[in-house]
Amino acid sequence: MRLAVVTPEYAGVTAYTGGIGSQYAMLAPELARQGHEVAVVTLAPDHPGARELHGVHLSLVAQPGRSILRPPAWTRAAGRAVRELGNLDLVLACEYAGGAWAYSRDERRAPLVTHLHSSTIQIAATSGWLRRQRVLPVVVMSRILERSQTRRSDALVAPTRSILDWTRRLWDLPSEMPAEIVPNAVEVEGVRKLAEGDPPDGFPGSGPVIAYAGRLEPRKGVHVLVQAMQQVWAELPDAQLVLLGADNAYRGESMADHLREAAGEHSAQLHLLGAQPRERLFPALRAADVVALPSLWENFATAALEGMALGCPMVVSSGTGFDEFMRPELDALMPLRGDPVELAGALLRLLRDEELRRQLGAAAATSAKAFDVSPVASRMAETLSRLGAARRE
């Protein structure tokens, strides 16, 4: 295939990257290694232009300036960049930020497949955004572009059935629109190799350690985790909680400040280490006794795949995307999302049972192999080829 990927973030290139950028930075080079011609259209960290990276052609478009103009400027620039690539077999575009909206309006375009991650409206709904945040012009514009791009697409690809079904209902998508499930990927051996280093400064040297990896935001359930820790601390007073992720807003204040206040007399056992590079993050996860990812909503959490690859004993929340790739009592303990009592019970059970930690970690490490980047990229290529061929017919 000759494939273009449209994404506002790409790990190692863009100024900001999260799970979306991490996934494409794994998939695109692997697709290129498997013989496909892959171009990625994304935002330039400094100077726009074109370059090659790991066998992938990068078309870097200028970072839009004023916030109210950012979404339309991004989609127009991305559309031009895709058209300049010439004849393509297919365009794969993230729905977040609506980067392929302008391209979707081109009557002579290649087949367009929208890749569902989590749209702005879904993030708002699961993150407790205030009304004043939801009605910001840049947010409203993003929602319009995302929905319109998705509705004009020839097909959909989603990592989980959860995000696919929700998106179909949310945007009243035609039932006849083709859609397939392709899971997210993880570089199993790469993650394990990076975990051989040292944890970041500030990682506790004693006491049972619970680690969390992810942005400090409501959608990730980090505030519920600190609630649950009150019961953990009551029964295991020397327990330590390590939070590895960038701070975000919560009800008009810093989430980090809210968590410190919520920890109360145990604030000294709350270690806010901020966002860490992978070579420090993965050793921290490996060194922890338990990894907790209590998200209120996840499409398909890359952090969970990384924890699985490392063989970490994990506690993750049920009732969200974790259910589709992790097995309760086999790969992880899975208390109900948003329930601090159930979460505390699962954490205490795992901290007190060394054999259970060993069993869960070993099973998770084995399960992670099914999500290694090579087989997932092959599955993605087969899916896109099939969806593109169906549209051309």
Image: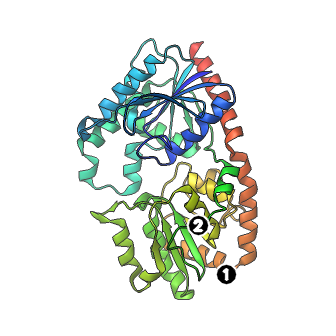
Q: How is the image coloured?
A: rainbow
Kind of residue at disc 1: Arg
- At a point 40% along the width and 35% down the height, the residue shown is 43
**Which disc, if any, is residue 352?**
1
- Nearest the viewer among 22 and 360 is 22
Picture layout, residue 182 above or below residue 349: above
Q: Position of residue 252 (x, y in %)?
A: 27, 63
In front: label 1 or label 2: 2
What whole-number distance in Å separates the C-alpha atoms at marks 1 and 2? 20 Å
- At a point 72% along the width and 77% down the height, the residue shown is 354
Q: Are marks 1 and 2 in contact (CB under 8 Å)?
A: no
Quarter of the rendering containing residue 253:
bottom left
| Secondary-structure class at tag 1 | helix
Quarter the C terminus occupies? top right
Residue under label 2, please give it. Answer: 284
Q: Is disc 2 surrounded by few (<14), some (14 to 19) or many (20+) residues within 10 Å? A: many
Q: Is disc 1 surrounded by few (<14), some (14 to 19) or many (20+) residues within 10 Å? A: few
Relative placement, left or right, of 100 versus 335 is left
**Which disc, if any, is residue 80?**
none
- Nearest the viewer among 165 and 188 is 188
- Nearest the viewer among 261 and 25 is 25
Q: How many marks?
A: 2
Can residue 318 be seen from the camera position used here?
A: no
Q: Position of residue 254 (x, y in %)?
A: 32, 65
Can residue 243 be seen from the camera position used here?
A: yes
Q: Position of residue 303 (x, y in %)?
A: 57, 55
Whichever of labels 1 and 2 marks the residue nearer the N terminus, that label is 2
Kind of residue at disc 2: Ala
